Amino acid sequence: MKKNRTFAVLNFFFAIMNEDIKSIIKLESEAILGIPVTSAYEQAVDLICEQVNRRGGTLITSGMGKAGQIAMNIATTFSSTGTPAYFLHPSEAQHGDLGILRPNDVMLLISNSGKTRELLELMSLSRNLVADVKFIVITSKPDSPLAEAADICLLTGAPAEVCALGLTPTTSTTVMTVIGDILVVSVMKKINFTADDYAKRHHGGYLGEKSREQCLIAHP
């Protein structure tokens, strides 16, 4: 009898947990579908291709906290797919690392609030070093200082966080990641990035092996 009650409680608990999981997936999926699709994406892709892929610049990404981790992921994904990119920590930038910035570079800044102090300072310091450096900003706030100072602004749609407190970056970082994927894939298509190109940059692991197999199929 006791075992039956225990199993009943566990089944009830798992049923509730499963519903919570389905709800989180649903809310995050809706947030992705709610990302505003505007001409700003075409402008951002054209800017990256022109400055980085044609003129030899670098895409420099930056952000603080969770947004910084997303920026780092975007930089490494761009680098492995034919567009040189580098993550610059906004605090380290103020201690000499800003010296990496050169003419023709493009800066991609990520801030949910659009008013991250370190990024605002980075924007100002960058323009002191390279006056005409271009900025792409990913944010949820179109009227924020970063959005207004950017050359191109990509909005997240300002989804509510699925965190029970409504505070922890969860849904916001999901849509930031998707926006980064949109930029990466769009640039790959525009520069005609191939499996051959991928294999040269990603030699190790499963993906390296798979890309080499695709090359052999394409060029037997």
Image (cartoon, grey):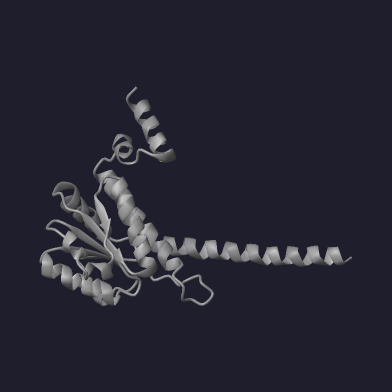
Q: Quadrant of the N terminus?
A: bottom right
Q: Residue at x 11, y 64 (%)?
A: 132
Q: Residue at x 39, y 30 (%)?
A: 213
Q: In the rendered image of this protein, does residue 158 appear above or below residue 52?
A: below
Q: Residue at x 26, y 45 (%)?
A: 82
Q: Is residue 125 visible?
A: yes
| Pick the front one: 74 or 138 | 74
Q: In the rendered image of this protein, does residue 213 appear above or below residue 42?
A: above
> Where residue 171 sits: x, y (%)?
45, 67
Give the left or right position of residue 189, taking residue 160 as reference: left
> Where residue 61 sits: x, y (%)?
27, 61
Q: Is residue 157 visible?
A: no
> Where residue 33 sits: x, y (%)?
43, 60
- The picture quadrant where one finds residue 2 is bottom right
Q: Residue furthest front?
A: 95
| Pick the front one: 65 or 182 | 65
> Where residue 48 sits: x, y (%)?
21, 54
Q: Residue at x 24, y 59 (%)?
A: 60
Q: Quadrant of the C terminus?
A: top left
Give the left or right position of residue 200, taking residue 210 as reference: left
Q: How many marks?
A: 0
Give the left or right position of residue 153, taking residue 105 as reference: right
